[in-house]
Image: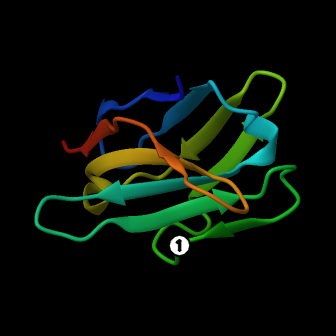
């Protein structure tokens, strides 16, 4: 079956860094757009970053531009979200989503990121 497994979340101080991973199985990962979302308590899910299947196009949400970097390694069926200069407002559950051009997409279970001193 299809699985997306996020890892790398945790507690970090403001200004710190974390690297999230999203390991995919059961799909041809290289044919899927990869998106990272986050959802903070009481807020709607927010698109943080997305990267096209071959990595040719990348987009970021305004709140993370210049601080976050999305990447992927299709040989390892894994996507990444490098998060630098973290702020308390980045605290949220982060989800990866694999989306094909046509058809249903898949979600990971989420990983908690907490930015606090």
In the rendered structure, the answer to whether residue 26 lies left or right of residue 32 reads left
Horizontal side of residue 114 vs 84, given as left or right: left
Name the residue rendered at 42%, 37% in the picture: 108
Question: Observer-nearest residue: 94 or 63?
Answer: 94
The residue that appears at 73% across and 62% down in the rendered structure is: 101
Q: Position of 94 compared to 40: left or right?
A: right
Residue that extends furthest to the left in the rendered view of this protein: 42
* Residue 17 locus on image (x, y percent): 47, 39
Q: Quadrant of residue 90?
A: bottom left
For label 1, the SS is: loop
Image quarter hosting the C terminus = top left
In the displayed structure, 50 sits above or below 72; it is below
Q: Which residue is mark 1?
A: 61
Q: Residue at x 58, y 42 (%)?
A: 82
What residue lies at 11% left-to-right and 66% top-to-bottom? Answer: 42
Percent x, y of residue 115: 26, 45
Crowdedness of circle 1 by 10 Å Cα count: few (<14), some, many (20+)?
few
Using the rendered view, name the quadrant where residue 30 is placed. Answer: top right
Q: Position of residue 45 (x, y in %)?
A: 32, 65
Of 93 and 103, nearer the camera is 103
Image position, residue 43 (x, y; %): 19, 70
Q: How did the renderer colour the structure? A: rainbow
Q: Is residue 104 above or below residue 48?
A: above
């Amino acid at each position: 079956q299809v699985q997306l497994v996020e890892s790398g979340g945790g507690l970090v101080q403001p200004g710190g860094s974390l690297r999230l991973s999203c390991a995919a199985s059961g799909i041809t990962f290289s044919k899927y757009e990869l998106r990272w979302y986050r959802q903070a308590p009481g807020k709607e899910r927010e698109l943080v970053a997305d990267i096209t299947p071959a990595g040719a196009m990348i987009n970021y949400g305004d709140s993370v531009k210049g601080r976050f970097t999305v990447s992927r390694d299709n040989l390892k069926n894994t996507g990444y979200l490098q998060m630098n200069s973290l702020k308390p407002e980045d605290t949220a559950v982060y989800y990866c989503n694999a989306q094909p051009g046509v058809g249903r997409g898949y979600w990971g279970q989420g990983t908690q990121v907490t930015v606090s001193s």
